[in-house]
Amino acid sequence: MNKPKKIKIKYRKSEVIAGYVFLAPSFLLFFTFMLIPIFMGFYISLTNYNGFKQMDFIGFQNYANLFADSYFTVALKNNVIYTLGTVPFTILLALLLAVAVNTGIKGAGLFKTFYFFPYITSSVAVGIIWTLLFNPKVGPINNFLRSLGIPEEGLPGWLLSTTGALPAVMIVSIWKMAGYYMIIFLAGLQGINKELYEAADVDGAGKLTKFFKITLPLLSPTTFMILILSVIGSFQVFDLINIMTEGGPGRATNVLVYRIYQEGFEYMKFGYASAEAYFLFGIILLVTLIQFIGQKYWVHTDE
Amino acid sequence: MNHKMSNNKKRVRIGRILLYLVLILVMCSMVVPFAWMLSASFKNNNEVFLYPIRWIPDPIRISNYIRVWTEIPFPRYYMNTLLYSVIVTAGQCATCSMAGYAFGKLKFPGRDLFFLLFLSTMMVPWHAIMIPQFMINKALGFYNHPQAVIVMNLFSAFGVFLLRQFIMGIPSDLVEAARIDGCGEFRGFFQIILPLCKPGLATLIVFTFTFMWNDYLAPMIYLDNDRYKTIQLGLASFRSLYMTDYGLIMAGTVCSLIPILIIYCTAQKYLIEGIAHTGLKG
């Protein structure tokens, strides 16, 4: 087919007016609170703005300083650990739950309801509950471990120890997010042609074979998308950290957004915090780009 | 042959039982933290951490709940959040359905460009722009006023997409027929489009309300004045105030979860549909 020639579309006047009028409120808000901040943020990141003193343009100095700043590099390292620790387990758990719920067992709806619930509860509430559960001296988790016969010195210090705090937050995150990704996996599973399974049944394929040869390959676009979503999400963790550890003990659970928050809203170093924010933006842009390119290699056909 | 069949059946049954066991185990892990919270909220400090856990408190003490509602400004936090959530939800329904209609059914110059612009900013993480957004809100005089968390949230790219998708699914013939009958674009929108996108709006309502109720960082940045604080802020500061009053903290947490629980019980369908929809299309 030839490329259609550019033809002048005849617009109807009433439609054009209505179009702009209907779009106006959204666009105005979008312009003020999204579009301007996107450009403004980048400009601020090139200055030493600190909230009241004047803004001096200092080029990429803030960015250059990022990697000499151990608070930032530690936060970045923690965040990468957090990503590597939460993403695979969350996806694996979500996938297993989705496949299990999708087998047509009785009570599937009930299971789904319970798995999904933690996702819509606030991180503040969830963080408060788990902080008590993780209490190393009297909390139920360590009490349970004690009852299994683990000696006192072998018990994790959880949120109060530099080695236990990040894993504890990670556990809560996996617990909270698995149900959400399960729902997306379930939607993906619905899209798989049932006839494929019937054909496999005729060929005498076992359950595992069907899972690895049909479900997993055909689910790959969903899995890929979930991978991207969860990586992006893991770089934006804040609420749980703020409630459970405040970045501590020491710097053990300090992560990127927490750094941005501290530099920006505790020390009012808007310029520097913006550079950190744009670094985060860069990471997410990169991940989105990977998704954009990756999608092409993951073209999924129903036939 | 027969023997093999029954063996197979047995294996299937064992598989089923194992599956149930795993599913129930995971379910317990999801429920136990909430059950523990609920149970602890009816206990006094000496009873909260007793082990083995006494799931049903004895005696059941309601004093924690009374203290939550009388000793701290919990009712005010509650009403504030409810008010912000309702305003933002209603506002988003209006702005998003209007924009969704413009993008989905109207032809005007620059439409696709605007749409692309909306689309491309959707992946911008909020945290990356929260500082300039803060400066704009401050310049507008919104800092430390409820407007700060209301106005900027009246727009939602997610909502625009959701409703655009939905409105595109409404047959154009309906809109055309109304036009022929002399129905203007505006009346067409209110009388034909809006009633037909109720399910889409329901999804948006559930999402927006939940988001607003649970939002923490934005209220924390913007609302310093105790008069305007939201439930999540109140809960967090209340926790640091009564650090070791565990039963009391749990009672407050239970109360903060009630609206979400109500939404979950009544409108779970819309939540799940919304996620499945945007998740796959996003």
Image (cartoon, rainbow, N blue to C red):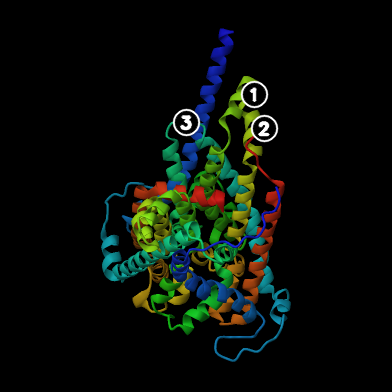
> Residue at coordinates 47% horizontally, 57% vertically from top-left?
B105
> Residue at coordinates 46% horizontally, 37% vertically from top-left?
B24
Determine if marks 3 and 2 fall on one subunit: yes
Instruction: Give residue B207's quadrant in the image.
Output: bottom left
Residue B76, above or below A9 = below
Q: Position of residue A88 (x, y in %)?
A: 63, 49
Q: Nearer the viewer, mark 3 or mark 1?
A: 1
Q: Position of residue A283 (x, y in %)?
A: 67, 64
Q: Nearer the viewer, mark 3 or mark 2?
A: 2
What chain is tagged by disc 2? A
Mark 2 vs mark 1, CA separation in Å: 10 Å
Question: Could you classify mark 1 by the number of other residues whose Cα lies within 10 Å: few (under 14), some (14-19), or many (20 or more)?
Answer: some
In terms of depth relative to the viewer, which is nearer, A248 or B157? Answer: B157
In terms of depth relative to the viewer, which is nearer, B167 or B276? Answer: B167
Type of residue at label 3? Ile
Type of residue at label 2? Lys
Q: Quadrant of the N terminus of chain B?
A: top right
For numbered disc 1, what is the local secondary structure? Answer: loop
Image mark for residue A213: 2
Determine if marks 3 and 1 fall on one subunit: yes
Mark 3 vs mark 1, CA separation in Å: 20 Å
Figure label count:
3
Mark 3 = which residue?
A105
For numbered disc 3, what is the local secondary structure? Answer: loop
Mark 2 in CB contact with mark 1 (< 8 angstroms): yes
Question: Could you classify mark 3 by the number of other residues whose Cα lies within 10 Å: few (under 14), some (14-19), or many (20 or more)?
Answer: few
Mark 3 vs mark 2, CA separation in Å: 22 Å
Q: Is residue B40 visible?
A: no
Image mark for residue A205: 1
The answer to which of marks 2 and 1 sits earlier in the sequence is 1
Mark 3 in CB contact with mark 1 (< 8 angstroms): no
What chain is tagged by disc 3? A
